Image: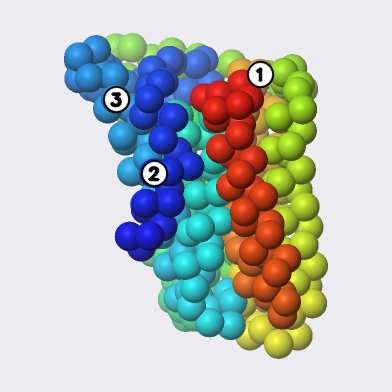
Amino acid sequence: MIILTMFALLVKLPMFLNPYIPVVHPKDGILFHIILRWLQPVGENLPAIYPILAFLFIMIQAFWLNGMMNTQRMMTRSTFLPAMSFILVTSLFPEWNYFSAPLLVNFALLFMLNLSFKIYHQTAGKSAIFNMGLAIGIASFLFFPSVAFFLLAFFALMIMRPFRFNEWLICLLGITAPFYFYIIYLVVAGNWDPQRLLPYVNIKLPSLIQSIWIAGSTLLLVIPFLVGGYFVQDNLRRMLIQVRKGWSVILIYLLVALLIPFVNNANTFENWVIATLPIAAFHSCTYFYPLDKLFPLVLFWITTAFIISFQYLGPGW
């Protein structure tokens, strides 16, 4: 853990040298607005508070993902490769190191993913299922488009448990519970406005700046993902059934996450940080499974060298 933390400080050093001050976007939820207002007095005197918090959140998410994959035996033995992969993946784009609403949403999604693995073994998992829905509901108050992850919750129920209509209703109740209490608050406070509950939603293709550096980052995302996907598929027969189901849930997680940035997009890569967790899970298999360790070793150093070149020789952070 210490070595990984030192490595993360190395590849993410520019985020501290040029602190990014977060701004409120229309798609950000009321809860994120409150967090920014609470941090604003500190941020005005100490702008470094934002990259410090972002770095801490990234490291917590990296080790949480790592612990979850080891506990659920997603690979044949315990390893720190998922955490390393997440650190590398989030370093490929500077926007993925910003203090942002999507970065905070990752905590709710990790919590939900962890519960979706656990309900496979539980005969009475109603509380866990409710909490899965509740995590999505809370996430939507940080970043409204993340409400679309209700699809992930329902697919996880479909994959991990036999169909029980009451469990699906419990999950739906968890999703809607934060909205229910927020409506009560608005009515009591005399601020009822449907627009505050359901913000404007617009779906369109993002207009992103194209460059050779962006192409390189994308290539280093896609190639290890495809290789990792191949190794997962190649080892499915040797995996326990709950592990196979777990990888199916992670893949659906990725598919939903890739669609989210098209909703109320800000024409940056900031929102795509939601997809980094499942991508890192597949990347870790690229480093773990090859019998000849030369390929993952070369891939690691190429990725690290590219990240540092992006920061100091390219557009920079």
Residue that carries the numbered disc 2 in the rendered image: 9
Mark 2 and mark 3 residues within 8 Å of each other at the beta carbon? no
**Across the whole image, how many numbered discs are drawn on residues?**
3
Is disc 2 placed on a helix, strand or loop? Answer: helix
* Amino acid carrying mark 3 in the image: Ala
Q: Quadrant of residue 232?
A: bottom right
What is the C-alpha distance between the residues marked 2 and 1?
28 Å
Compared with 269, 282 (above or below) is below
Left or right for 195, reference 149: left
Label located before the other in sequence (2 or 3): 2
* 308, 242: nearer the viewer: 308
* Amino acid carrying mark 2 in the image: Leu
Mark 3: give few (<14), some (14-19) or many (20+) Cα within 10 Å. some
Residue that carries the numbered disc 3 in the rendered image: 48
Residue 134 x/y as whole percent: 42, 48
Q: Residue at x 53, y 65 (%)?
A: 81
The nearer-to-camera label among 2 and 3 is 2
* 298, 184: nearer the viewer: 298
Residue that carries the numbered disc 1 in the rendered image: 267
Label located before the other in sequence (1 or 3): 3
Image quarter of the N terminus: bottom left
Label located before the other in sequence (2 or 1): 2
What is the C-alpha distance between the residues marked 1 and 3?
25 Å
Mark 2: give few (<14), some (14-19) or many (20+) Cα within 10 Å. some
The nearer-to-camera label among 2 and 1 is 2
